[in-house]
Image (cartoon, rainbow, N blue to C red):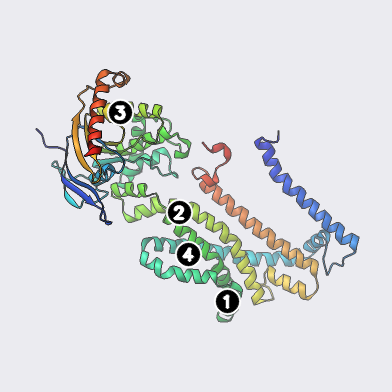
Amino acid sequence: MTAPLVALRGVAKRYDSGTLAVQGIDLDIAAGDFLALLGPSGCGKSTLLRMIARLSATTGGSIDWPGGRPQARDIGFVFQEPTLMPWATALANVALPLELAGLPKREAAARAADSLARVELRGFEAAYPRALSGGMRMRVSIARALVTKPRLLLMDEPFAALDEITRFRLNNDLLTLWEAERFTVVFVTHSVFESVYLARRIAVMAPRPGRIHAELAVDAPYPRGEAFRTSAAYAAHCREVSGALEGAMAA
Amino acid sequence: MMGSARAQRWLRVLGPLVIGVVFLGGWEWLVRARGIPPYVLPGPVAIAEALARDWPALSAALLVTLKITALALLIAASLGLLLAVVFAQSRILELSLFPYAVILQVTPIVAIAPLIIIWVDDVTLSLLICAWIVAFFPILSNTTVGLNSTDHNLLDLFRLYGATRWQVLWRLRLPTAMPFFLAGLRISGGLALIGAIVAEFVAGTGGRSSGLAYRILESGYQLQIPRMFAALVLISATGIGIFLALSLLSHLLLRRWHESAMGQGDRR
C-alpha cells in the first residue's frame, strides 16, 4: 500500500475552555480519495477539518504529510458560506489565492478565468457576488479553492445552505470535476444521503468527544449519476451508514 | 401610477418642494400682513435681497468658512483613518489611546475653543484645530469598528494562503471598513462645519479673514437682521452641499457591492 497523502494519528483538540472537541482520531487520507466525514452537529468534524488545514492547532497527536510538508497552494478550503469578498468581482475573488502568493496579475487573472470556466461560470467574470445566486456563489468559492491546483480539497458542509435542486446539481458537478482531476477531497457533511452519493469512503463520527466511530467504503463505481441516487445499492449503502450513525450516537 | 418608481422619484422632489414653497409663502404673508419690522423678523424676500446686495462680502466669508471646513475634514479623515489602522494593528495602543479620543469627543467644543484661540496665535490655525476636533472622532470610531468587522472566514482564508499582515490589511480589512469610514465621513462633514462656525463665533475675528459666523455677529451688532439671515441661509446651504457631496462620493464608491448604496432594482 502506498503512503497516504495525510496521516492523522491520535489527533486531539482541547479548547481553552477545557472542552474536549475531538480525541484519538486515527485516519489515513489516501491520495485521490473522496472521503466524507459524517456526523451530527457538534461532533468535531469541522474542528478536525480546520486542524488538517492548519487553521487550528492540535493539542495532541500528529497530522503528517508523508509526501512532504504542504505549501499554501496545496490545500483548498471551501467554507459552509461562499465567503467571497463582496467588493471584488468573481474573477478577482478566484484570483485572490494566486495574487496572495505573488503571481503577476495577468497570469493570476488568466488562471482564475480558467478556474471559473471549470465550474461553468464562463461569462460571469465581472459579476459581483451580490448579483449571483447562492449556487453560483458557491461555484465561485469552489473555483477559488481549485485555482491553485491543490492536492487536498477540504469542504466544510459546502452545500448545506443550498436548496435541494441546486445541491444535487453541485454534487454532480463536483463529482465530474473530481473524476477529471483526481484531487483528494475531504468532505464534511451531516447528510447520510449526500455522503453516500459522493464519497468513496465515509468516516462516521461520534460526538462528545468527537471521535471516529466507523469507517465504511462505498464501492459503487463512478461516474455516479441520478440513476445511482434511485438504485437499490444506494439505498442499501444509506441503510448501512444510517445504522453506523445510530450506533455512533448511542456510543 | 403612484406605485411606480418614476412617480416615487417625482414625489421625492415635488413633496419637499411644495412644503418649502408653502412655508416660505406663509412666512412672507405673515410678515407683510402683521407688519413685522425686518429687524425683528425679515421675510424671505428681504433675506434674498440682502443676500444679493451683500453677496461680495458674504461670498468672501463663505469661502473662508468653506476652506477651514474642508481642510479640517481632510485632516480629520486622514488622521482618523491612520489612527484607526494603528489601533487595528496594536490592541495595546487602542486600549491606551481610545479613552483620550473619547474625552476629546465629549468635551464641548464651545468650552475648549477659547483656550485653543488663546494658545494658538494664528487664528486660521486655531479655527482649523477646533473644526478638526469635532470632525475627528466619528471617523476614528467608525473606521475602528469597520476594521474589526472583518468576516472571520475570510480571515481564515487569508491565513490559509499565507497572507502577510500587510495583505490582510490592504486587501481585506480596509475594504471591509470602507462603508463604515464613509458613514463616519458623512457625519464628520456636517460636524466640521459646525466646529468651524462655533470657533469663529468664539474667536470673533474681523477683517479680511472672517467667515460666515463673524458676518452673523457683525450683522447682529448692526441690527442688519436680513443680512444675518442671509448668512444663516448660506451656512445651511453649505451644510446641505457637504452632505450631498459626501453622499455622492459614498454612493460612487459602494454602488457595485454594498447594500447601503444599492437601489431597489439591484437587490436580489
The answer to whether mark 2 and mark 1 are in CB contact below 8 A is no
**Is there any visible trace of residue A152 in the rendered image?**
no
**Residue A96 falls in image quadrant:** top left
Query: In whole angstroms, how far apart are the C-alphas of marks 1 and 3?
Result: 70 Å
Q: Residue A1, image x and y in percent?
A: 9, 32
Q: Earlier in the sequence, mark 2 or mark 1?
A: 1
Q: Quadrant of the N terminus of chain B?
A: top right
Same chain, marks 4 and 3?
no
> Quick check: B96 left or right of A212?
right
Q: Chain of mark 3?
A: A
In the image, what residue type sits under mark 1? Answer: Ile
Mark 1 element type: helix
Q: Residue tagged by mark 4? A: B79
Where A1 falls versus B208 (above or below)?
A: above
Comparing labels 3 and 2, the label whose residue is closer to the camera: 3
Mark 4 Cα-neighbour bin, 10 Å: few <14, some 14–19, many ≥20: some
Q: Residue furthest bottom?
A: B118
Q: Earlier in the sequence, mark 1 or mark 4?
A: 4
Mark 2 element type: helix
